[in-house]
Image (tube, helix red, strand yellow):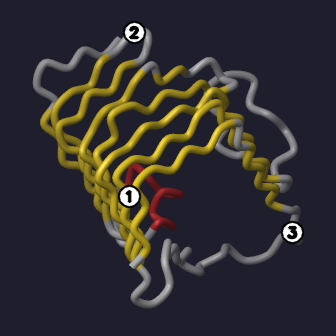
Amino acid sequence: LIDISKARLDHVIVGIDLLKHAPGPPDTNIMQVHFMLGDMRVQFDEFELTNTTFRLDDHSRDTLLPSGMDFKHLLVSDINIFAENGTVVADSVLAKVNHLSAKERSGFQLVKLTTQAQVTTKDITLEKLNLKTPDSEIKDYLSFRFNAYHDFKDFINAMRIKANLTDSRLT
């Protein structure tokens, strides 16, 4: 067990480059994600990430989309998060997110997200949700259930979504 009282990271830059690969049959491997190995467990009272940038470039797709979010070429900046009472164990993360904000190069802006979050290899559940963008607000409860993270590639057909969006406003 690793028990952290407070952790603060400022001006972190994360870049991921997915290199080109030769054309071939579709990849049927299921992406496995584990945050901790074995019985390792991390708990934290407070975690803060400020002024952070995340970049993902899939070089097998060289062309940037002219509009909208390009999930093959993400550039997310001004990422700020403050979370409390978190636990990371094996393939699961649980935390109370008091603030999450970010901007994506497409123009999408997450003004503020607060929630009690649970992320595992089979689901993402956001309870007591309040998600604000400049023009919309999503409240209450949202859950995505899936067989593996690979299912995000076929979001419409593979995801099972459960939601209670009381008092939400979408524009």
Q: Please name the residue shown 31% across and 52% down the image.
A: 95
Q: Position of residue 129 (x, y in %)?
A: 23, 34
Quadrant where the C terminus is found in the figure:
top left
Rendered view: 30 above or below 14: below
Q: Tell me if label 2 and label 3 are in contact, CB under 8 Å.
A: no
Q: Nearer the viewer, residue 118 or 146?
A: 118
Left or right: 162 with respect to 54? left
Q: Position of residue 71 (x, y in %)?
A: 64, 43
Q: Which residue is mark 2?
A: 135
Question: Residues under labels 3 and 1: Cα distance?
Answer: 39 Å
- Tell me the SS state at disc 3: loop
Q: Sort mark 1 into few (<14), some (14-19) or many (20+) by Cα contacts within 10 Å.
A: some
Q: Position of residue 66 (x, y in %)?
A: 75, 23
Q: Sort mark 3 into few (<14), some (14-19) or many (20+) by Cα contacts within 10 Å.
A: few
- Outermost residue on the front side: it is 5
Question: Residues under labels 2 and 1: Cα distance?
Answer: 33 Å
Quadrant where the N terminus is found in the figure:
bottom left
Rendered view: 61 above or below 25: above
Q: Which residue is mark 1?
A: 44
The numbered disc on residue 21 is 3
Amino acid type at image mark 3: His
Q: Position of residue 74 (x, y in %)?
A: 69, 39
Rendered view: 125 above or below 129: below
Dividing the picture into quadrants, the one containing residue 12 is top right
Q: Nearer the viewer, residue 59 or 14?
A: 14
Precedes in sequence: disc 3 or disc 1:
3
